[in-house]
Amino acid sequence: MSTSHTNVGDAQVPAKLAIPELLDMKRQGTRIAMVTAYDSAGARLAEAAGVDIVLVGDSAAMVVLGHDSTLPVTMDEMLFMTRSVSRAVEHPLVVGDMPFGAYQVSDADAVRNAIRFVKEGGADTVKLEGAGRMLPRVRSIVESGIPVMGHLGLTPQSVTALGGYKAQGRTAAKAKRLLEDALALQEAGCYSLVLEAVPTPVASRITEALTIPTIGIGAGPACDGQVLVYHDLLGLTEGHTARFVKRYADLATVIREALAAFVADVRSGAYPEERHTYGMPADELAAFEADLGNPVA
Ligand code: KIV
């Protein structure tokens, strides 16, 4: 995807990816790359790599904050991370993931919290999970002027009701329900839809049926785009990862070895070397030493 630019004074800065451009990408068959990020460093690297959408996912609860599900992360924690991401990027859309509790209670609550993502977090759009009871929430947020990304299939905020982190839509009836929910979310105004852990043929039929792009995670190659969690794709997550995760690096090993080398250098005195230190003019040093030898009374 070529990035358009806008002029700011003499400088050319990459223009923000517009939602109509995202819809064009689907029409033209240009696949959309989305990744999660939770801080400025990660977001900056994602933009440099050509990512189209940066999702400040509520997966932060697990990969950043160390919880064992996505449920505990709060609005304030999500806003803190969203601010640092949105400050760092120019072109990619920044999507704030509405955490559990931020939109379940009422439409008014959902709109209030979506507005906080935009006003306080600098997000361009928000994402929320589910259809059914959530459709009025989507409509209300869209009516307030904030674009909404939907999320169907394995919706981690409902992990208890779903009976664990399992693929969804694996019976004819459940697949049909997923397709109906996807169409209902499009009808409610979503501009795109995440499909998580859904059989490939089901994701393919949903992608064909929708005019908005689908972004898959464990939903096969027919989706209009793909998303992975930053820590998973970079190999920062250790232990079990989902079947759909592809590791593009083993940063945990790189980081562990670098930290161990630092500890060893500190213990042995090999760090710091002369080149890591600061000197001072000889006459100033002499004066300092003389002063120490002859303290002023
Ligand atoms: O929170 C998250 O990271 C997500 C992605 C897995 C889509 O919702």
Image (tube, grey):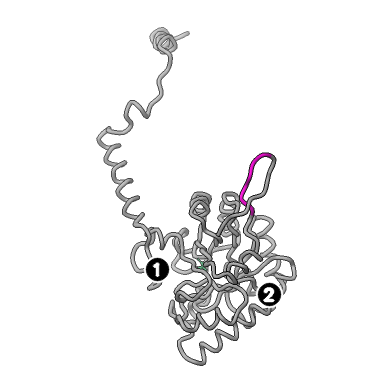
Left or right: 61 with respect to 136?
Answer: left
Q: Secondary structure at mark 2?
A: loop
Q: Is residue 27 above or below residue 289?
A: below
Q: Position of residue 59 (x, y in %)?
A: 49, 65
Total number of numbered discs in the rendering: 2
Hey, what amino acid is under mark 1?
Answer: Val
Left or right: 40 with respect to 9?
Answer: left
The range drawn in magenta is: 10-15
Q: Is residue 51 above or below residue 160?
A: above
- In the rendered image, the residue lying farthest to the front is 28
Question: Which of marks 1 and 2 precedes in the sequence?
Answer: 2
State yes or no: residue 14 in magenta. yes
Graded by Cα atoms within 10 Å as few (under 14), some (14 to 19) or many (20 or more), the crowding at tag 2 reads many
Q: Secondary structure at mark 1?
A: loop
Q: Which residue is mark 1?
A: 245
Which of the two residues, 65 or 215, is positioned nearer the viewer here? 215
Residue in view at x 58 percent, y 51 percent: 89
